[in-house]
Amino acid sequence: MHKLLPAEHNWPLHSAASSRAIEREALATLPPHTLMERAGLSAARLCLALSSSRLSIWLLCGPGNNGGDGLVTARLLHSHGMDVSVSLIGHESGRPLPPDAQAALAAAQQAGVNISEGLHPPQSTSLAVDALLGLGISRAPTGEITAAINCLNACASPVLALDLPSGLLADTGNLAGSVAVHAQHTLSLLTLKPGLFTAQGRAHCGQIWFDSLGVEHEAAPDALLLGAEALQTIARSRSASHAQHKGSQGDALVLGGAPGLRGAARLAARAALASGAGRVYVCLLESEASSAAEADAMRPELMQFAQQRLHDAPSWQDKVLVCGCGGGDAISECLPMVLRHAKRLVLDADALNAVANNPSLRPLLTDRAAQGLATVLTPHPLEAARLLGCSTADVQADRLKAARNLSTQFNCQVILKGSGSIIADPESNRLAINSSGNAALATAGSGDVLAGWLGGLWAQHPNTPPALLASAACYWHGRAADEQEAGPLRAADLVERMHALHRLTLAPEWGSRTPSTA
């Protein structure tokens, strides 16, 4: 069994359909009931680790195989001497249980487990176990299942969800209806599902554990969960040569910071500098000559780049261009030239809004890849919705699909920001979900820092595929917030926190290490 977060390694993620196919294959090769027995044993072990041996454990078991896993768990805990009670939920409809779940119920009854139909919460419990729906959910919970979910959410004791919190969709991380279990722990069984890590998944899952149940398979993952291994891109291409100098570390140019929005461009530039770019320039839009003496008084290392120089494309097109941070309406004027000439481009914030609002800019963006020009888009959900011509709710309803659609439509790499940021790559047609980060990043300027950090990494590693750099930047950005105990992580402080994490890129080769177990 593995404790997933913080994730040191990348992990394969499998959709509900893929997970069911893997399960069918395992059931066809294993003796009857083996998979459910393994699932129950794994859950029982985790229950013992999470609860006091002197109090009771209450299991709510639904009418499917997830309920069967719970019944095996109950039987094993009972045999270990724990005070166990089981509430059968949704069993009164008269439909027969699946064969494995029926066998689990019979074995639990024979073992003398305290089992009753309907909701009968014990007076006190050290742990409640959600074994109501799991992967088997196909529609919004109703009736007794909804009542059971609400009861779990009102429970004073911690809740452990088996496979998925009931009511949460495995593929999207959204709720199937209006309610889902808020668990403090989730034990994902057989496979890891994308919905655990994006949209509302992290908010409902708590700490995530994983047990493959000893099943090996060759099914291709539907997505990848990014861990610290994402930083191997930086570690393997990092040079320790004493001959390095600022010119060999690459140049980045931040274009944005219209009047009243200067801070966004300065944050992006500070991030590019802190990431290790050799030289970082800032082009503040609509700058007067009198204000062009310095890009950032707090960071004299940053250099001013006059806006009129943008007409001389050869003077900047080889630099990594981070475009749009605090750009306001003024960014629209620059975008045609930027889209035609920038060889490596991070497009963020107001630059994305300009593309969404101006139909003439869309083909310029779409055609860049055919001309050998590389682009990474870094939208938050509202910006993604504007680009896709839909609502923010539509984007959030299936974040993986939205990221893939953006990547396909504009033929470029995409970071769809949010809880469980999604990285989409049209070249490999692969999706990744970032595992790091928390609500401390929900503060003004954190997106500018991500865009600037990516630009700085790209300046240093011009030959590394941008999807790998986007993954590294996302993980790095989130990891800096993981130790924040409370409150927002202010963007200027985030830059410094990220700078302090350069030590992570000096760790031993990730590929030579095995995942930690719990």
Image (cartoon, helix red, strand yellow):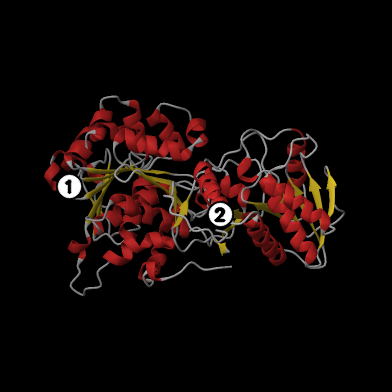
The number of numbered badges drawn on the structure is 2
Q: Quadrant of residue 72?
A: bottom right
Q: Residue at x 76, y 48 (%)?
A: 60
Q: Quadrant of residue 509?
A: bottom left
Q: Residue at x 28, y 32 (%)?
A: 332
**In front here: 140 or 242?**
140
Q: Residues within 10 Å of mark 1 (few under 14, many from 20)?
A: many
Specify whether 205 is left or right of 301: right
**Where is mark 1, residue-wise?**
316
Number of the front mark, 1 or 2: 2
Q: Is residue 508 above or below residue 454?
A: below
SS of the residue under disc 1:
loop
Which badge, 1 or 2, is on the more N-terminal residue? Answer: 2
Residue 58 seen in the figure: no
Q: Position of residue 204 (x, y in %)?
A: 62, 47
Q: Is residue 276 above or below residue 451?
A: below
Specify whether 485 is left or right of 69: left
Instruction: Identify the amino acid type marked 1.
Output: Trp
Instruction: Identify the amino acid type marked 2.
Output: Leu
